[in-house]
């Protein structure tokens, strides 16, 4: 009897995932809940456990391939499963049992067949206890920030034990796909010279790019050219999500942008005063800008909205879920502070700090990357003054802040050197007119120039 394990519903409305790294190959033995593959969704990289035990009969996709939810991942032969016992019994006569899929957005999990009991995460096998290694974590109720580099490292160690390569080879390169090894042999390529992708695993696309660069260098030498030829980079993972979202934004949203220069001298003084009196709070410029932005959305709620084109309605959101741009190992991401309107400035600072650290470590969960209703983009950290932001679809607006620099400024009838920044505001013209957008931007500008005036309404 064979058992087909299909790509499960990973929750958060995700409909597909990219194969990043296989931890098993055809002929390997697997146990129930063993992580067999790492996939990357539009939200996060997660390791997927198999609900069946037995021998790997077939791997249905290679690294770099994008699969829709429900497509076959792996076929297990000659074993038992941890899926729905009734379903397994009903399909046994047909020779194939398939892993159950989540429904209605329910996130994937596996069960032990014995007593239909969930596995306990602190149960270690005799082999692991003898080896002195910790038991791999098991995803009981879906995926989140816990499935990060440490989990993938443990899965990789299991894979290396089963494949039994030499220690030198294991430390030199990380190759999972047999196709990659075959191509390397055919072209006499030393895989140690190939630069892996962001996951650290050499994929077919990485090898193809390396071969192309060799051909380009050879052709350049023949032509006597000093420059390199073109290199094709696959659009994958978070980059693919960004491309799709921004393309949708440009295609669907009739956006407009307005901007204003503001004197941020008092804002910087307020930041310094808070740092001096409340150093434990860690309130910097971004939390203060977030505080002012949330107050502006309370005064102009039409901008905390989205357009439901199917229903022909504009949806005003009750909560302010404030997104902000941050860099991560997977590229630019937009973590979301949920319920920002109910937070104090200190709480906002703590939430922003926590999400920024998670972004840098690549540990943001899907829930922390979804549900935003408005985005604050501090592109001043890149040393630029202004920009025309592209709205983060399906939101209706984005506020951008440039660098804060010393500039001559008319202050109390005299030209003085002041801390000046530029605010740029892009909005969906379907949700409001220029008057509303201008009113919001002016509210924010006044809050930056006179931050203490906000105290009357907070």
Image (cartoon, rainbow, N blue to C red):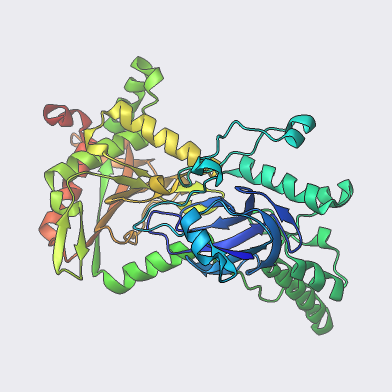
Pinpoint residue 136: horizontal percent, then vertical percent.
64, 39
Q: Is 411 situated above or below 254?
A: above
Front position in the image: 100 or 355:
100
Asked whether 279 or 414 is in front, the reply is 279
> Residue 335's spot in the image, x, y percent?
40, 46
Q: Residue at x 29, y 39 (%)?
A: 290
Q: Is residue 306 left or right of residue 346?
A: left
Horizontal side of residue 218 vs 26, given as left or right: right
In the image, is residue 34 above or below residue 1? above
Residue 245 versus residue 201 in the image, above or below? below
The quarter of the image holding the C terminus is top left
Q: Nearer the viewer, residue 37 or 453?
A: 37
Residue 195: % across, % down: 73, 59
316 or 84: nearer the viewer = 84
Residue visible at 18% across and 65% down?
Answer: 429
Establish if 324 lies above or below 276.
below
* Residue 156, percent from left and from top: 71, 48
**What residue is drawn where x is 56% and y is 65%?**
92
Q: In the image, is 407 to the left or to the right of 136?
A: left
Q: Quadrant of residue 62?
A: bottom right
Left or right: 324 as drawn, with respect to 100: left
- Looking at the figure, which quarter contains the N terminus? bottom right
Q: How many marks?
A: 0
């Amino acid at each position: 009897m064979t058992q087909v394990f299909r790509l499960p519903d990973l929750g958060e409305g995700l409909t597909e995932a990219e194969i990043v790294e296989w931890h098993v190959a055809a002929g390997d033995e697997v146990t129930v809940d063993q992580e067999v593959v790492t996939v990357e969704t539009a939200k996060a990289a997660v390791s997927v456990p198999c609900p069946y035990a037995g021998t790997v009969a077939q791997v249905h996709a290679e690294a770099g391939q994008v699969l829709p939810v429900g497509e076959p991942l792996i076929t297990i032969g000659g074993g038992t499963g941890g899926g729905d016992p009734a379903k397994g019994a009903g399909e046994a006569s047909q020779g194939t049992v398939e892993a159950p899929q989540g429904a209605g957005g329910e996130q994937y999990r596996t069960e032990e067949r014995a007593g239909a009991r969930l596995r306990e995460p602190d149960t270690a096998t005799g082999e692991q206890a003898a080896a002195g290694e910790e038991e791999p974590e098991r995803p009981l109720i879906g995926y989140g920030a816990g499935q990060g580099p440490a989990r993938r490292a443990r899965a990789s160690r299991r894979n290396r034990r089963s494949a039994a390569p030499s220690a030198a080879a294991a430390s030199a390169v990380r190759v999972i796909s047999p196709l990659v090894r075959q191509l390397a042999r055919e072209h006499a390529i030393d895989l140690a010279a190939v630069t892996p992708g962001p996951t650290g695993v050499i994929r077919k696309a990485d090898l193809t790019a390396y071969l192309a660069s060799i051909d380009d260098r050879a052709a350049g030498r023949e032509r006597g050219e000093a420059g390199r030829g073109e290199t094709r980079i696959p659009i994958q993972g978070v980059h693919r999500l960004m491309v799709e979202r921004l393309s949708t934004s440009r295609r669907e949203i009739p956006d407009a942008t307005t901007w204003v220069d503001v004197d941020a001298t008092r804002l910087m003084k307020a930041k310094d005063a808070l740092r001096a009196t409340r150093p434990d709070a860690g309130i910097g410029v971004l939390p203060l800008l977030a505080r002012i932005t949330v107050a502006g959305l309370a005064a102009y709620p039409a901008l905390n909205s989205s357009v439901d084109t199917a229903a022909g309605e504009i949806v005003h959101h009750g909560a302010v879920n404030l997104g902000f741009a941050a860099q991560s190992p997977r590229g630019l991401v937009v973590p979301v502070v949920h319920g920002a309107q109910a937070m104090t400035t200190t709480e906002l600072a703590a939430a922003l700090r926590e999400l920024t650290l998670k972004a840098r470590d690549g540990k943001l969960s899907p829930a922390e990357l979804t549900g935003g209703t408005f985005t604050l983009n501090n592109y001043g950290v890149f040393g630029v003054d202004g920009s025309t932001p592209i709205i983060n679809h399906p939101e209706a607006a984005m506020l951008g802040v440039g660098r804060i620099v010393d500039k001559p400024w008319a202050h109390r009838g005299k030209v003085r050197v002041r801390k000046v920044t530029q605010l740029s505001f892009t909005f969906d013209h379907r949700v409001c007119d220029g008057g509303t957008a201008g009113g919001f931007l002016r509210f924010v500008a006044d809050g930056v120039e006179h931050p203490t005036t906000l105290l009357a309404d907070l």
